[in-house]
Image (spheres, rainbow, N blue to C red):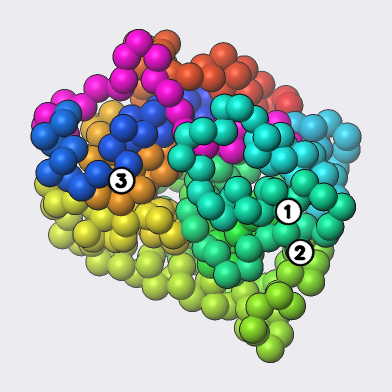
Amino acid sequence: MTAPTKNTATGSLVGLALGDALGFPTEFNDVPSILAKLGPWRDMDLPRPLAHITDDTQMALAVARALRTGMGRGTLGPKRFERPLREEFVDWYHSPDNNRAPGNTCLTACRLLDSDRRWQQATQIHSKGCGANMRVTPLGLVPGLSDAQRSGAAQLQAALTHGHPTALAASDLTARAVQLLAEGVDPAGLVGQLRSHALRSRTVYREDWLGDLWRGSQDPDPEHFVTRGWDECLAVLEKLEAALRDPNPEIDPCLVTGAGWIAEEALATALFCFLLFVDEPVLALRRAACTSGDSDSIAALTGAFAGAHLGTDAWPEDWVERVEHREELLAIGAAWDGGTL
């Protein structure tokens, strides 16, 4: 493994926001409509004068703030993370800026979290929407966590709103992909490493982080519960590997690896866009934003992967200058790149 790319945390967080902003105007549109509105996808530009982000970046920042708060109090564990995370999610729910087409699952769960009930009673156990992993990027970037802590915390941040086992597994894998790329893993071997992580984790129920979450499902035991999620992720990784053997960048990626409304497809389609254009990150974002599915979430994760791989040099300065929440993204990224909170 090579040395970490310079400023990978900054590059990844900014890339997430840029992808989110680029995909915001194209979400809910089919590809012909996007092309008619914006022209050729290879020439798509970031909105001017201010590139507005969506709930994807808002909630990723909420996760980042919760991590800084929790880790500022000592070793990160379930309680130390869950408390500030819950507060951040409830604050987001009540924010006047929460008007960027937020998902129903997040809204419902966060409304229920605004109470004295246990989070396991607030989560939407049958939802595996991409809201689970569109916001998990900070878990792959924050310094000072063990692999077990990263996996547990990635699953917990998903579980507060999306309790489906596939949402947990896809979030774990998304954070793992960001971490591996930031550490310098060759993108050519990334999918294989994710598959290995899934196989190692396939029967592991992280009770210390998830408590009795599984009891809200119809599964007979926690192992059966968690295995369902990892198996769905393994299946979509297999589909991704097949697509990469003979890729066509001119075909809508959603037709290849899924529309991205659900967590495992958001992971796979974002990885597909990133791996189509490993050395051309802006083109990867444009391809991700010009898709018929959940374009902002797909592009946000694509940007997170590309930025983790290439660092801040991946992004045009004029794009970075006009993205919403630029100062907070840069401040968190700089701290994490410097090894501090």
Q: Quadrant of the C terminus?
A: top right
Which of 84 and 144 lies nearest the eye of the viewer?
84
The location of residue 82, given as percent across then percent down, is: 79, 48
The CA distance from mark 3 to mark 1 is: 27 Å
Residue 168 position, x and y percent, is 60, 62
Residue closest to the eye, 65 or 180: 65
Residue at (51%, 43%) from the top-left corner?
A: 102
Other residues around mark 2 within 10 Å, as few (<14) / some (14–19) / many (≥20):
some
In the image, residue 66 lies at what x, y percent?
73, 36
Q: Provide the residue designation for mark 3.
A: 28
Name the residue that disc number 2 marks. 121
Q: Say which amino acid is labelled 1.
A: Leu
**Of circles 1 and 2, which is in front?**
1
Q: Earlier in the sequence, mark 1 or mark 2?
A: 1
**Residues drawn in magenta:** 39-67
301 and 85: which one is in front? Answer: 85
Q: CA distance from mark 1 to mark 2?
A: 8 Å
Asked whether, in this view, residue 118 is left or right of residue 331, the answer is right
| CB within 8 Å, label 1 to label 2 | yes
- Return the mark for residue 112: 1
Q: Quadrant of residue 34?
A: top left
Instruction: Specify whether residue 40 is painted magenta.
Output: yes
Amino acid at pointer 2: Gln
Q: Residue at x 83, y 59 (%)?
A: 118
Residue 251 x, y percent position in the rendering: 14, 51
* Cα separation between marks 2 and 3: 31 Å
The secondary element bearing badge 3 is classed as loop
Q: Which sits earlier in the primary sequence, circle 2 or circle 3?
A: 3
Marks 3 and 1: CB-CB under 8 Å?
no
Q: Is residue 262 above or below residue 43?
A: below
